[in-house]
Image (spheres, rainbow, N blue to C red):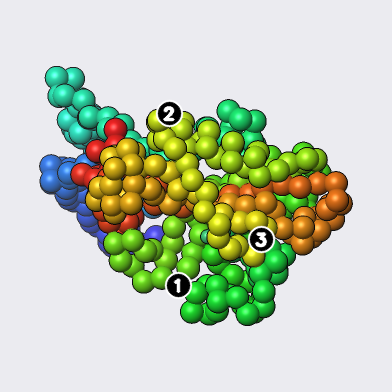
Amino acid sequence: MQQWLQAYLCIVQYRKVNRMQEKLKIILKNTRDLLEKAAGIDETEMIRVKVLGKKGELTDILKSMGKLPPEERKELGRAANDVRKEIENLLEEKFAKVKEAAKEGRFRLEKIDVTEPGREFVLGVKHPLTIVTEEISGIFMSMGYSYAEGPQADTVFNAFDALNSPKDHPSRDMTDTFYISDDVVLRPHTSTVQIRTLIKQEPPIKIISPGRCFRCDTFDATHSPMFQQIEGLLVDEGINMADLKGTLDSMAKKLFGSATKTKFRPHYFPFTEPSAEMDVSCFKCGGKGCNICKGSGWIEILGCGMVHPNVLAVGGLDTEKYTGFAFGMGVERIAMLKYGVDDIRLFYENDMRFINQFK
Ligand code: DAH
């Protein structure tokens, strides 16, 4: 090789090494600046990858050194290694710092003030309608009745036809009952459960069935389109009106006090024959007459009667062998009487000031 060429190549090489050394200095300076500003673990890690990662700036230089002649490689290698060590130290320091800061941040966040007062645990109270339903159900359970349930939407058959209700009975009207379809209604009474039970069970039958009912009534102080009833049904051999009266009289005494008297007035229900409404002597005035009993001394609380043979027949029962009685009462009405509540709407408003009074 000619001498001048050799000299030229030497200069080129020298410049290259020089440039790389410059580059190393810049990388070190930039890294130091960046690390100074970096705020957290993620940012620090990004800087590490940028410089020391697989495609990092310093890694690039270290890789390209392979192409240098041994002399320069040695010199530049040492410089590059020094820079790498320094950067590694800087990173280590920074990581220690940001990790500590993160830990402290977490401690601050998770700090528990053990002197802070605990959260108050508010124990709910039973709704007055639940109290009354449980009380009445409890009375019948103690007489050996069991609990039956039926759906709130039921067939027209269970709500009317099977209960011996004439086709033209006014309660069937769209203006009285909520129809979901031609054959399904929101049950207007819990008497639907009588049919369901008669079809399912063999006598002796002795059930009560509390639940929601629906009628197309406009909300006012004494009416609600949704209300609750408790239905009762007893069917066995040799059941008569005396059993009905004895049972309901006993329930009234337990519910309103032992001095309570009962009176049965003839009435009409399609599903019972004979049918009656039961009045109780006014528990406020004892029968003298007051605002609760509207001066009469008596308060009507339920409908009842001897189950109509046509109803028993739906359950496939031998109507010569079996007789029974049934009754149905409105839970809201009894709760209003018992607690002196003068507006049915109060039961549904969920105003805790009202509900808490029944603790
Ligand atoms: N289902 C009647 C109503 O909603 C109440 C009733 C009356 C139920 C007489 C009965 C009964 O079981 O025998 O007004």
Question: First in sequence: mark 1 or mark 2?
Answer: 1
Marks 1, 3: nearer the viewer:
3
Question: First in sequence: mark 3 or mark 2?
Answer: 2
Which quarter of the picture shows residue 344? bottom left
Tell whether circle 3 marks a residue whose Cβ is less than 8 angstroms from ligand 1: yes
Of residues 3 and 299, the one drawn nearer to the viewer in this rendering: 299
Label disc, if present, on residue 29 of the rendered structure? none
Question: Badge 2: few (under 14), some or many (20 or more) residues near its Cα, within 10 Å?
Answer: few
- The answer to whether the residues at label 1 and label 3 have Cβ atoms under 8 Å apart is no
Q: Give the spatial CA distance, label 1 vs label 3.
A: 21 Å
Q: In the displayed image of the protein, which residue is found farthest to the top?
A: 115
Instruction: Report the residue at 65% width, 56% height from top.
Output: 274
Determine which residue is flagged by label 1. Answer: 216
Q: Is residue 248 visible?
A: yes
Determine which residue is flagged by label 3. Answer: 271
Determine which residue is flagged by label 2. Answer: 258
Q: Secondary structure under badge 1?
A: loop
Of residues 339 and 107, the one drawn nearer to the viewer in this rendering: 339
Q: Is residue 315 left or right of residue 114?
A: right
Instruction: Report the residue at 70% width, 53% height from top.
Output: 307
Which quarter of the picture shows residue 236? top right
Query: Quarter of the image containing the N terminus?
Result: bottom left
Amino acid type, residue under disc 3 in the picture: Phe
Question: First in sequence: mark 1 or mark 3?
Answer: 1
Amino acid type, residue under disc 1 in the picture: Cys
